[in-house]
Image (tube, helix red, strand yellow):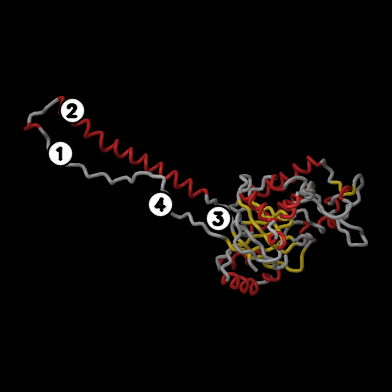
Amino acid sequence: MANKPIKIKRNTSISGKKRQRMAVVKKVAGIVLAIAGLAALGFFGAPAVMELIDNINNPKPPEMTPVVTPAPEPTPVPEATNDPSDVQVEDIPVKTAVYSAVTANDVRDQAAMTATAQRLAAMGVTDVVVTFKDADGRIYFETATEIGKQAKGPVMIDVRQLVDIFSQHNIDVTAQVYAFMDKITPAIDRTTAVKYQGTDMNWLDSSVELGGKPWANPANQTVQNYIYDLVKELGDMGVKDFIISGVQLPTGYSLEYRDFGVTNDQLQAQLQGFINTIQSRVAAKGGDAYLAYDLDVLISGDMSRYIINPLRYGASHVVLVGKNAQFENGAADAVIEKYSEDEAVEVLCLWNTEQSLAEHDGVNGYFVK
């Protein structure tokens, strides 16, 4: 990916910790303290009360009265209140992550990795985004997948070394992987391509004369498994967090002739299943998978590339990708305000591909150049 600015927001880290946890912990702490106070009163007060009643009903001769050493005063239990300042909650920092996208050339070898890590660390960057499968389908790391071996890009990144060097500078690595926006995979394995309706011919997004290309079929199991395998390989090499881009239908000309081999309802179910599988598999390894969607879709209301509103596919971590004009004219603000409060979306991120963004209401962090 070109050295583009991105903006992401999250709490503590890209693992998606929520500020709401602080409120829950405080509330629970107050309840626990109140119960502790009642328990202490019952524990220490009950024996004294029973002894007093017994002495009144059964007076003892003076010479028989035992000498009792007073028990130490119990440690006072603070009275629980609704004031958050009355409850001390430790180790729940709220931190804005600062991301930077770099090109494969920026991390092409050990020297480049070290120089880039030092530069970004000096800027206060906490996370770096590296594209390992681009929008054309090129792969930028050594993969064992059969398709990936034939789709190598111009630079091969040593993923383990990358993770190690950046971790030494307290920077985490996030891998960007394009899914179905892929023009190379169908050329390698034509069974993975979207077809022209009712034929075995590969559908093209434009005419051959204008350089039209085929697209990977999101309903094709080989394509889905290929993405799963790439994510697993990167995870095994130390990458925890991912931005999954291009989870969509092909765009271009003659859209009415696209044939996915399934009905629209089945295709919609395939997209939802893919998203759920990616997020659950990444989460099982302690990371987060962010689904990247186009902000202009939510602004315009044209959902053709996703069939339905992409935020309804069940992604809990979302990146909305936009451009300068959408932020300058305020079109993005209404969308961000609406979906930042959407209970279905746990973390809402923002990526301006044309410039770096300062803090923005409704999102939790940002990317810098």
Q: Residue furthest front?
A: 329
Q: The C terminus is located in which quarter?
A: bottom right
Q: Which of pointers 2 and 3 lies earlier in the amino acid sequence?
A: 3
Give yes or no for contact between labels 3 and 4 (Cβ–Cβ under 8 Å).
no
* Three-letter code, disc 2: Asp
Please, is residue 38 above or below residue 284 in the view?
above
Q: Nearer the viewer, residue 128 or 82?
A: 82
Query: Which residue was labeled with disc 2?
Result: 54
Residue drawn at the location 58% of the way across and 54% of the way down: 15
Residue at the far top in the pictured view: 57
Q: Amino acid at mark 1?
A: Val
Q: Circle 2 sits in a helix, a strand or a loop, which is it?
A: helix
Q: Which residue is mark 4?
A: 85
What residue do we see at 29% from left, 46% from top? 76
* Residue 130: % across, % down: 67, 63
Work out how far the residue at label 1 is from the one at label 4, CA to CA, in angstroms.
41 Å
Q: What is the number of the mark on residue 11?
A: 3
The image position of residue 305, as x and y in percent, is 79, 50
- Give the foreground label among 2 and 3: 3
Please name the residue that numbered disc 1 is placed on: 68
